[in-house]
């Protein structure tokens, strides 16, 4: 299908992009990689009155190690994160995740900022951001990941607010991310991440609710000495996954337990 009519403007700076969003009002959307927004526009499930293209803002494309933090600009492409030595040395699970996103076309065009700002429960980066207590930096403020993902496709971003950077803690210890899907390039039906950090485990789950989930019950069980298979049984505690065409809630809970166990056992 053909998208509904919309206005288009290309920004060369964050300040200009914010100004354009203000001018167009709440019906405007930011365009980065476009792999989530454009398909919805083609189906007319999304009909923004204006697009503000931020791809010309080169200052938002970077990967930097900053002491105990890894700073990634919002326009950094998945393929850059996948191949970056800085990422692989400082947060290898993020490079692993980037390599699991979509196909080559998606990885070459899609951006970390777009995925985070879109806040799809099936997105991979939000899970890593939440479980590692990352910060989402905008042109106006810094928002902890636990406060950023509020509901499905819902964040605290104001109409003229733009994600500029995602800041992760450095974590180069044992890690693994596993996503279960029907076909190679699909979104995860369920995903599970395990990362050793500061002597303990961080466990995150993808697509088991309206937002990413940090499985603290699993972390607590591991901290108390439980074996991976025992701790992973707590992965479904409190989960309320949606029923959809790919899996019912009980199957998603089952996948959460199985994938969590595998992620912990395969972490290296």
Image: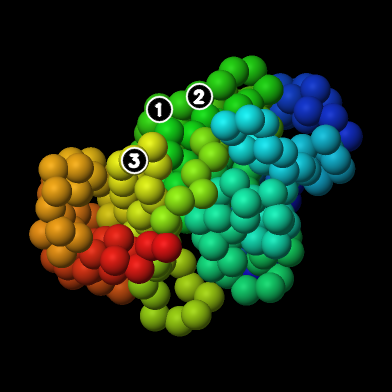
Q: Residue at x 52, y 60 (%)?
A: 97
Q: Is residue 173 left or right of residue 47?
A: left
Is 81 situated above or below 266? above
Q: Position of residue 55 (x, y in %)?
A: 81, 46
Report the front residue among 85 and 131: 85
Task: Identify the image quadrant of the C terminus.
Answer: bottom left
Q: Which quadrant of the figure has residue 71?
A: top right
Q: Alpha carbon of mark 3 to alpha carbon of mark 1: how far?
A: 25 Å
Determine contact: label 1, label 2, CB under 8 Å.
Answer: yes
Task: Identify the image quadrant of the N terminus.
Answer: bottom right
Report if residue 180 is visible in the image.
yes
Q: Which residue is mark 2?
A: 143
Q: Residue at x 30, y 61 (%)?
A: 264
- Label 3 sits on a secondary structure element that is loop
Circle on res. 199:
3
Mark 3 or 1, nearer chain start? 1
Report the front residue among 41 and 86: 86
Of labels 3 and 1, the one closer to you: 3
Circle on res. 147:
1
Q: Residue at x 39, y 50 (%)?
A: 195
Report the front residue among 87 and 180: 87
């Amino acid at each position: 299908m053909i998208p509904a009519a919309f206005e288009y403007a290309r920004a060369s700076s964050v300040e200009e992009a914010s100004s354009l969003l203000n001018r167009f009002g709440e019906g405007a959307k930011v365009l980065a990689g476009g792999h989530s927004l454009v398909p919805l526009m083609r189906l007319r499930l999304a009909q923004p009155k204006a697009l503000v293209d931020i791809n010309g803002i080169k200052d938002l494309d970077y990967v930097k190690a900053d002491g105990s933090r890894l700073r990634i600009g919002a326009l950094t492409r998945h393929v850059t994160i996948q191949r970056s030595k800085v990422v692989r040395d400082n947060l290898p699970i993020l490079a692993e995740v980037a390599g699991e996103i979509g196909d080559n076309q998606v990885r070459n065009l899609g951006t970390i900022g777009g995925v985070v700002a879109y806040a799809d429960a099936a997105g991979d980066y939000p899970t890593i951001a939440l479980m590692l207590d990352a910060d989402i930096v905008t042109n106006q403020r810094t928002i902890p990941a636990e406060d950023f993902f509020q509901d499905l496709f819902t964040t605290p971003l104001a109409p003229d607010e733009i994600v500029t950077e995602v800041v992760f803690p450095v974590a180069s210890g044992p890690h693994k991310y596993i996503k279960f899907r029907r076909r190679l390039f699909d979104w995860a039906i369920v995903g599970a991440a395990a990362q050793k950090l500061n002597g303990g485990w961080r466990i995150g789950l993808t697509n088991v609710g309206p937002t990413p989930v940090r499985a603290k019950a699993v972390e607590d069980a591991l901290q108390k000495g439980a074996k991976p298979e025992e701790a992973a049984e707590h992965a479904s505690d409190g989960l309320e996954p949606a029923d959809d065409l790919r899996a019912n809630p009980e199957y998603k809970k089952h996948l959460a337990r199985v994938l969590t166990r595998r992620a912990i056992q395969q972490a290296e």
